[in-house]
Image (tube, rainbow, N blue to C red):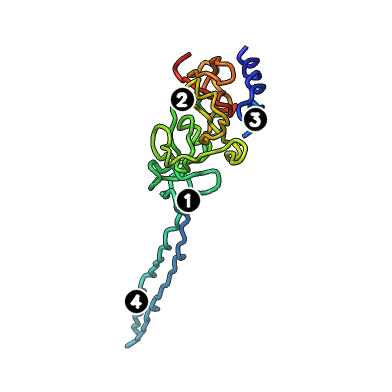
Amino acid sequence: MAVLSLLALGAWTCGGDSDLFSAGTVTTTSGGGATSSGAGGGGAASSSGDGGSSSTSSSGGGSGGSSSGAGGDGGSGTGIGAPCTWDGAPCDPNLYCQAEGCGAGTCQPVLPQTAQEKQFAPICGCDGINYFNPSIAASFGMSIAHGDRCTEDEQVGCHKANNPCAQGYFCNRTVASLPSCMLSPIHTGECWAVPLSCDPNGPQAKACANSLCYDLCSLIQSENPWYGPGTC
Protein backbone atom coordinates (compact mmCIF):
# COMPACT_ATOMS: atom_id res chain seq x y z
CA MET A 1 0.00 0.00 0.00
CA ALA A 2 2.92 2.36 0.77
CA VAL A 3 4.25 1.88 -2.76
CA LEU A 4 0.87 2.75 -4.33
CA SER A 5 0.58 5.80 -2.11
CA LEU A 6 4.08 6.90 -3.04
CA LEU A 7 3.25 6.59 -6.71
CA ALA A 8 0.32 8.84 -6.06
CA LEU A 9 2.78 11.43 -4.84
CA GLY A 10 4.29 11.72 -8.26
CA ALA A 11 0.94 12.69 -9.74
CA TRP A 12 0.66 15.71 -7.44
CA THR A 13 2.46 18.74 -8.60
CA CYS A 14 3.77 21.52 -6.46
CA GLY A 15 5.25 24.29 -8.53
CA GLY A 16 5.40 21.95 -11.51
CA ASP A 17 6.54 18.70 -9.78
CA SER A 18 5.33 15.47 -11.29
CA ASP A 19 7.94 12.87 -10.40
CA LEU A 20 8.23 10.81 -7.25
CA PHE A 21 11.78 9.61 -7.29
CA SER A 22 14.94 10.89 -8.81
CA ALA A 23 17.76 8.52 -9.53
CA GLY A 24 20.84 9.44 -7.72
CA THR A 25 24.70 7.24 -7.34
CA VAL A 26 54.05 0.31 3.21
CA THR A 27 55.20 1.85 3.95
CA THR A 28 57.98 1.30 1.58
CA THR A 29 61.52 1.17 2.81
CA SER A 30 64.75 1.25 0.92
CA GLY A 31 68.01 0.21 2.36
CA GLY A 32 71.54 0.21 1.11
CA GLY A 33 72.90 -3.29 0.65
CA ALA A 34 75.34 -4.59 3.16
CA THR A 35 78.95 -4.29 2.18
CA SER A 36 81.77 -6.47 3.47
CA SER A 37 85.46 -6.23 3.33
CA GLY A 38 88.12 -8.37 4.80
CA ALA A 39 91.84 -8.31 4.89
CA GLY A 40 94.06 -11.06 6.15
CA GLY A 41 97.79 -11.03 6.54
CA GLY A 42 99.52 -14.12 5.30
CA GLY A 43 101.38 -16.21 7.83
CA ALA A 44 105.15 -15.87 7.96
CA ALA A 45 107.27 -19.00 7.90
CA SER A 46 110.99 -19.43 8.56
CA SER A 47 113.29 -22.38 8.75
CA SER A 48 116.83 -22.75 9.91
CA GLY A 49 119.19 -25.66 10.24
CA ASP A 50 122.32 -25.98 12.37
CA GLY A 51 124.48 -29.04 12.76
CA GLY A 52 122.06 -31.27 11.08
CA SER A 53 119.17 -30.19 13.19
CA SER A 54 116.42 -28.34 11.71
CA SER A 55 113.38 -26.65 13.00
CA THR A 56 110.47 -25.17 11.25
CA SER A 57 108.09 -22.65 12.70
CA SER A 58 105.16 -20.95 11.18
CA SER A 59 102.80 -18.34 12.39
CA GLY A 60 99.85 -16.65 10.76
CA GLY A 61 97.47 -13.94 11.72
CA GLY A 62 94.58 -12.44 9.87
CA SER A 63 92.26 -9.59 10.65
CA GLY A 64 88.59 -10.58 10.60
CA GLY A 65 86.39 -9.22 7.86
CA SER A 66 83.97 -6.44 8.77
CA SER A 67 80.52 -5.70 7.32
CA SER A 68 78.28 -2.71 7.53
CA GLY A 69 75.14 -1.50 5.78
CA ALA A 70 73.44 1.87 5.76
CA GLY A 71 69.68 1.69 6.36
CA GLY A 72 67.42 3.41 3.85
CA ASP A 73 64.98 6.24 4.67
CA GLY A 74 61.46 5.12 5.59
CA GLY A 75 58.85 5.77 2.89
CA SER A 76 55.58 7.64 3.28
CA GLY A 77 52.22 5.90 2.84
CA THR A 78 48.59 6.74 2.18
CA GLY A 79 47.15 3.30 2.88
CA ILE A 80 44.76 2.18 5.61
CA GLY A 81 45.58 3.87 8.90
CA ALA A 82 47.95 6.41 7.37
CA PRO A 83 47.63 9.92 8.83
CA CYS A 84 45.79 12.42 6.68
CA THR A 85 44.02 15.76 6.79
CA TRP A 86 40.65 16.54 5.33
CA ASP A 87 41.92 19.18 2.92
CA GLY A 88 45.29 17.50 2.29
CA ALA A 89 46.56 14.92 -0.19
CA PRO A 90 44.07 12.12 -0.97
CA CYS A 91 44.34 8.63 0.44
CA ASP A 92 44.85 5.56 -1.74
CA PRO A 93 42.00 4.53 -4.10
CA ASN A 94 38.89 3.24 -2.31
CA LEU A 95 40.00 4.97 0.89
CA TYR A 96 39.03 8.33 2.31
CA CYS A 97 40.29 10.61 5.05
CA GLN A 98 38.12 9.91 8.08
CA ALA A 99 38.68 13.17 9.92
CA GLU A 100 36.15 14.10 12.59
CA GLY A 101 35.58 17.83 12.49
CA CYS A 102 37.26 18.11 9.06
CA GLY A 103 40.76 18.26 10.55
CA ALA A 104 43.35 15.51 11.02
CA GLY A 105 42.40 11.86 10.69
CA THR A 106 43.41 8.53 9.17
CA CYS A 107 42.82 6.86 5.81
CA GLN A 108 39.97 4.36 6.04
CA PRO A 109 38.06 2.18 3.54
CA VAL A 110 34.97 3.61 1.87
CA LEU A 111 31.98 1.68 3.23
CA PRO A 112 30.23 -0.54 0.65
CA GLN A 113 26.71 0.68 -0.11
CA THR A 114 25.42 -2.77 0.79
CA ALA A 115 26.57 -2.09 4.36
CA GLN A 116 24.57 1.14 4.75
CA GLU A 117 22.44 1.40 7.86
CA LYS A 118 18.88 2.70 7.70
CA GLN A 119 18.27 4.44 11.01
CA PHE A 120 17.66 8.19 11.04
CA ALA A 121 20.60 9.84 12.80
CA PRO A 122 21.48 12.84 10.61
CA ILE A 123 24.95 14.32 10.49
CA CYS A 124 26.54 17.19 8.59
CA GLY A 125 29.31 16.22 6.18
CA CYS A 126 32.46 18.25 5.59
CA ASP A 127 31.02 19.01 2.14
CA GLY A 128 27.89 20.69 3.54
CA ILE A 129 25.64 17.76 2.62
CA ASN A 130 23.25 16.30 5.18
CA TYR A 131 23.69 12.54 5.58
CA PHE A 132 20.91 10.31 6.89
CA ASN A 133 23.34 8.68 9.32
CA PRO A 134 27.13 8.25 9.71
CA SER A 135 27.23 5.05 7.64
CA ILE A 136 25.80 6.91 4.65
CA ALA A 137 28.59 9.46 4.91
CA ALA A 138 31.16 6.64 5.08
CA SER A 139 29.67 5.04 1.96
CA PHE A 140 30.16 8.34 0.14
CA GLY A 141 33.71 8.65 1.48
CA MET A 142 32.80 11.75 3.45
CA SER A 143 34.10 12.92 6.81
CA ILE A 144 31.71 14.23 9.46
CA ALA A 145 31.80 17.90 10.33
CA HIS A 146 29.48 17.47 13.32
CA GLY A 147 26.43 15.59 14.51
CA ASP A 148 22.94 16.72 13.54
CA ARG A 149 21.99 18.59 10.39
CA CYS A 150 24.08 21.24 8.71
CA THR A 151 23.26 24.79 9.66
CA GLU A 152 21.81 27.16 7.12
CA ASP A 153 25.25 28.66 6.58
CA GLU A 154 26.87 25.24 6.08
CA GLN A 155 24.36 23.34 4.00
CA VAL A 156 24.29 22.98 0.24
CA GLY A 157 21.04 24.46 -1.01
CA CYS A 158 19.16 23.20 -4.01
CA HIS A 159 16.39 24.12 -6.41
CA LYS A 160 14.68 21.11 -7.91
CA ALA A 161 14.46 22.59 -11.39
CA ASN A 162 17.26 25.13 -11.68
CA ASN A 163 19.90 23.92 -9.23
CA PRO A 164 19.50 20.20 -8.55
CA CYS A 165 21.79 18.30 -6.22
CA ALA A 166 24.71 16.30 -7.60
CA GLN A 167 24.03 12.77 -8.78
CA GLY A 168 23.32 10.43 -5.89
CA TYR A 169 21.93 13.20 -3.66
CA PHE A 170 18.36 14.43 -3.20
CA CYS A 171 16.81 17.87 -2.82
CA ASN A 172 15.02 17.59 0.52
CA ARG A 173 12.09 20.00 0.47
CA THR A 174 10.61 20.05 3.94
CA VAL A 175 8.16 22.76 5.03
CA ALA A 176 6.92 23.87 8.44
CA SER A 177 3.26 22.86 8.23
CA LEU A 178 0.36 21.96 5.99
CA PRO A 179 -0.49 25.62 5.23
CA SER A 180 3.09 26.04 4.01
CA CYS A 181 2.40 23.35 1.44
CA MET A 182 0.03 25.74 -0.27
CA LEU A 183 2.76 28.25 -1.02
CA SER A 184 3.83 28.20 -4.63
CA PRO A 185 6.34 27.52 -5.89
CA ILE A 186 8.01 25.26 -3.32
CA HIS A 187 11.19 24.36 -5.10
CA THR A 188 14.04 25.09 -2.73
CA GLY A 189 15.58 22.77 -0.15
CA GLU A 190 18.92 21.30 0.92
CA CYS A 191 20.88 18.37 -0.47
CA TRP A 192 20.73 15.08 1.39
CA ALA A 193 22.20 11.60 1.03
CA VAL A 194 19.94 8.74 2.14
CA PRO A 195 20.10 4.92 2.11
CA LEU A 196 19.61 3.21 -1.23
CA SER A 197 16.90 1.14 0.40
CA CYS A 198 14.55 2.87 2.84
CA ASP A 199 13.00 1.38 5.96
CA PRO A 200 9.21 1.74 5.63
CA ASN A 201 8.95 1.45 9.41
CA GLY A 202 11.36 4.30 10.04
CA PRO A 203 10.37 7.77 11.32
CA GLN A 204 7.31 9.12 9.56
CA ALA A 205 6.11 12.48 8.24
CA LYS A 206 3.34 13.68 5.93
CA ALA A 207 3.47 14.37 2.23
CA CYS A 208 2.09 17.71 1.11
CA ALA A 209 0.35 15.91 -1.75
CA ASN A 210 -2.16 14.02 0.37
CA SER A 211 -1.22 14.42 4.05
CA LEU A 212 -0.56 10.70 4.26
CA CYS A 213 2.34 9.37 6.30
CA TYR A 214 5.50 7.95 4.74
CA ASP A 215 8.96 7.24 6.06
CA LEU A 216 11.36 10.18 5.96
CA CYS A 217 13.82 8.41 3.66
CA SER A 218 11.17 7.89 0.98
CA LEU A 219 9.89 11.45 1.35
CA ILE A 220 13.39 12.82 0.80
CA GLN A 221 13.92 10.52 -2.18
CA SER A 222 10.68 11.77 -3.73
CA GLU A 223 12.03 15.35 -3.72
CA ASN A 224 8.46 16.54 -3.20
CA PRO A 225 7.48 18.79 -0.25
CA TRP A 226 6.56 17.23 3.08
CA TYR A 227 5.86 18.38 6.61
CA GLY A 228 5.10 17.33 10.14
CA PRO A 229 7.79 14.90 11.34
CA GLY A 230 6.50 13.21 14.46
CA THR A 231 2.81 13.83 13.68
CA CYS A 232 2.07 10.37 12.27
> Residue 99, relative to residue 180: is it above or below?
below
C-alpha gap between disc 2 and disc 1:
45 Å
- Residue for badge 2: 176
Q: Earlier in the sequence, mark 1 or mark 3?
A: 3
Image: 95 above or below 179: below
Please, what secondary structure does the residue beneath circle 4 have? strand
- Observer-side mark, 4 or 1, equals 1
Q: Mark 1 or mark 2, which is nearer the start of the sequence? A: 1
Kindly report the distance in space between the C-alpha atoms of the residues bearing marks 4 and 2: 105 Å
- First-in-chain label (4 vs 1): 4
Amino acid type assigned to the residue bearing label 1 in the image = Thr
Q: CA distance from mark 1 to mark 3?
A: 48 Å
User: In the rendering, at what x and y percent does residue 190 appear?
Assistant: 51, 35
The amino acid pointed to by label 4 is Ser
For residue 78, the mark is: 1
Furthest residue toward bottom: 51
Q: CA distance from mark 2 to mark 3?
A: 20 Å
User: Do callouts 1 and 3 mark residues in contact (Cβ within 8 Å)?
Assistant: no
Which of label 3 and label 4 is nearer to you? 3
- Locate residue 221, reporting x and y percent: 58, 28
Q: Position of residue 26 (x, y in %)?
A: 47, 51
Amino acid type of the residue that numbered disc 3 sits on in the rendered structure = Gly
Residue type at numbered disc 2: Ala
Give the SS element for disc 1.
loop
Dot 2 crowding, Cα within 10 Å, few <14, some 14–19, many 20+: few
Badge 4 is on which residue? 59
Residue shown at 61% from the left, 30% from the top: 15
From the image, tell me which residue sits under label 3.
Answer: 16
